[in-house]
Image: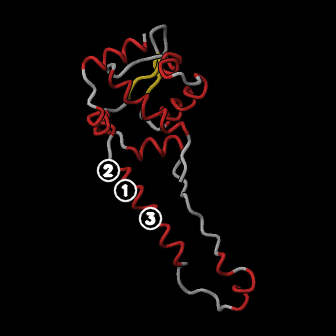
Amino acid sequence: MRMSKGVEWALHTLINLDVIGGGPMHSGRLAEAHGLSPSYLTKQLQQLAQAGLVSSVSGPHGGFRLARALEDITLLDVVEAIEGDVKAFHCTEIRCEGKIGALSPPPTRTCAVHAAMRRAEDAWRQALAAQTLAGIRADLNVTPAAARLVRKALD
């Protein structure tokens, strides 16, 4: 499965917002800090806002801020916010098509390929749901010096 760059951008942005105390931070500054397209990152932030992961603050010191603690945000939350919750595999019942389909009796069970792919995708989604952004931030081991660098990059 291939995910868009937006998932990576969203994950780093959420963690950076946490590093600076939750926000708010203007999307342009967040984009500039990583050399990203401001319009594309704003789109990701709007999708995160629709999913309730960030909120928008208006005004001269506004921007986006975390709407939930990193402990309450999973990788699955972010993937679904950016990519949607559409299943990756779509069975088209190819087993019923062409000469094989014409010569075979109609199926009475779920397609075994479909069932196997669904099990694999369900396991992937469960693994994403089990990983919080707080765990990722802990793995990053953001030292006070590193946090200062992130704040400086966002100034």
Element type where label 1 sits in the image:
helix
- Labels 1 & 2 near each other (Cβ < 8 A): yes
In the rendered image, the vertical position of residue 154 relative to residue 124, given as above or below: above
| Mark seen at residue 126 | 1
Res 41 quadrant in image: top right
Is 61 in front, or is 136? 136
Element type where label 3 sits in the image:
helix
Give coordinates of residue 95: x percent, y percent. Answer: 64, 80
In this rendering, position of residue 5 left or right of residue 137 = right
Question: Could you tell me the amino acid type at mark 2?
Answer: Ala
Q: CA distance from mark 3 to mark 2?
A: 15 Å
| Mark seen at residue 120 | 3
Quadrant location, the C terminus: top left
Q: CA distance from mark 1 to mark 2?
A: 6 Å
Give coordinates of residue 154: x percent, y percent. Answer: 43, 14
Element type where label 2 sits in the image:
helix
Question: Could you tell me the amino acid type at mark 1?
Answer: Gln
Give coordinates of residue 56: x percent, y percent. Answer: 47, 23
Residue at far top of view: 60
Is 141 in front, or is 124? 141
The crowd level at tag 3 (other Cα within 10 Å; few <14, some 14-19, many 20+) is few
The crowd level at tag 2 (other Cα within 10 Å; few <14, some 14-19, many 20+) is few
In the rendered image, the vertical position of residue 123 relative to residue 20, given as above or below: below
Question: Could you tell me the amino acid type at mark 3?
Answer: Ala
In this rendering, position of residue 98 left or right of residue 125 = right
At 39% across and 61% down in the image, what residue appears?
Answer: 123
User: Which circle's residue, 1 or 3, is located before the other in the chain?
Assistant: 3
* Residue receiving disc 2: 130
